[in-house]
Image (cartoon, helix red, strand yellow):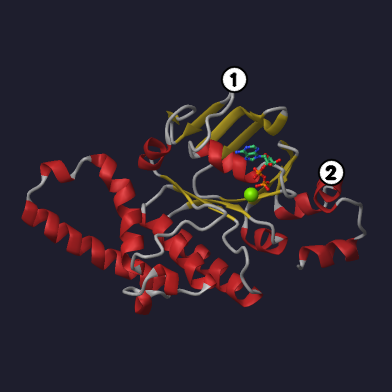
């Protein structure tokens, strides 16, 4: 398993945001995590990526390493990259430098710079920049490389966040609502690019998404959270037909026709 949690727990005061979650993700999979607002999806990411410390008794393993109490930069250096629900870009930095910052986040911790000469660093920087430009053209932002991130449209910023996360060359990429706020056309475009990037870079992916259709179309397996607990897991079709999921997610039972409508949001 690339990622594994056992008895994962996190309480905020009396609120169990994540409640005894066992989770296993094999390499190569695209996993969807769905659940109503406040069900613990973002908290799950925050625990796995080290932003929050889990409660005692929890266990998290990534790529064979016990990362239960490791800080974010160590987990990042092991090859786990994530995006945040609210975009975090360097607004006054150029598009290309935002992407370069993703690359350096990963490499900094390898202490490479200390052991190679200045000329080599320069050559290496140029090589990295070429590689990052290729990544930018892949997501369709090459023409905007020298603009400030603040000058991009909402959809372009989502693509930049994605490019920066991939610049870290992760083994696992976790996306928190990557399509939030996008128009349907932009959502389709973004998902197409995510799928292509997955193949090109051999990524394993976890996607948190509230647009159910996106998860249904693209994920191999879907994990459903409700009140911090894992209430279902299976193929998109299995999950969509699960009564507990329908009740938790949509608040009421629905017939097939209503369900189809809800999933086509
Ligand atoms: N830092 C925090 N402090 C207090 N409560 C939090 C914190 N982060 C999340 N929560 C609470 O934990 C629950 C799960 O939140 P979250 O993981 O953001 O849900 P989701 O991403 O599924 O919408 C919510 O009730 C939320 O208010
Ligand atoms: Mg969230």
Distance from Cα at disc 1 to Cα at disc 2: 27 Å
233 with respect to 23 (left or right): right
Which residue is identified by label 2? 244
Taking the image as drawn, is residue 1 in sight? no
Q: 138 and 236: which one is in front?
A: 138
Residue 205 on image: x %, y %: 52, 51
Name the residue rendered at 69%, 57% in the picture: 210
Q: Earlier in the sequence, mark 1 or mark 2?
A: 1
Residue 9 on image: x %, y %: 63, 28
- How many other residues sit within 10 Å of disc 1, few (<14), some (14-19) or many (≥20)? few
User: Can you tell which quarter of the image residue 231 is in?
Assistant: top right
Residue 247 on image: x %, y %: 86, 48
Instruction: Spot the residue most to the front.
Output: 92
Tag 1 secondary structure = loop
44 with respect to 230 (left or right): left
Q: Looking at the picture, does residue 102 appear above or below residue 41? A: below
Name the residue rendered at 60%, 27% in the picture: 6
64 with respect to 221 (left or right): left
């Amino acid at each position: 398993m690339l990622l594994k949690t056992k008895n994962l727990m996190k309480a905020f005061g009396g609120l169990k945001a994540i409640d005894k979650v066992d989770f296993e993700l094999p390499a190569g999979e695209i996993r969807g995590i769905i659940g109503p607002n406040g069900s613990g999806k973002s908290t799950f990411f925050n625990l796995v990526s080290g932003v929050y410390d889990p409660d005692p008794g929890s266990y998290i393993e990534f790529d064979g390493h016990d990362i239960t109490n490791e800080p974010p930069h160590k987990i990042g250096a092991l090859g786990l990259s994530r995006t945040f629900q609210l975009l975090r870009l360097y607004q006054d930095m150029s598009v290309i430098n935002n992407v370069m910052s993703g690359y350096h986040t990963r490499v900094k911790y390898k202490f490479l710079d200390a052991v190679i000469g200045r000329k080599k660093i320069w050559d290496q920087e140029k090589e990295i920049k070429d590689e990052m430009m290729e990544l930018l053209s892949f997501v369709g932002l090459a023409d905007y490389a020298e603009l400030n991130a603040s000058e991009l449209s909402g959809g372009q910023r989502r693509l930049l966040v994605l490019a920066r996360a991939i610049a870290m060359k992760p083994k696992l990429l976790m996306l928190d609502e990557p399509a939030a706020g996008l128009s349907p056309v932009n959502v389709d475009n973004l998902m197409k690019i995510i799928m292509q990037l997955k193949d090109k870079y051999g990524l394993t992916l976890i996607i948190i998404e509230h647009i159910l259709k996106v998860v249904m179309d693209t994920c191999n397996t879907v994990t459903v959270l409700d009140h911090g607990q894992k209430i279902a897991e299976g193929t998109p079709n299995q999950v969509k037909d699960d009564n507990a999921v329908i009740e938790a997610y949509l608040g009421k039972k629905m017939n097939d026709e209503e369900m189809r409508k809800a999933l086509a949001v």
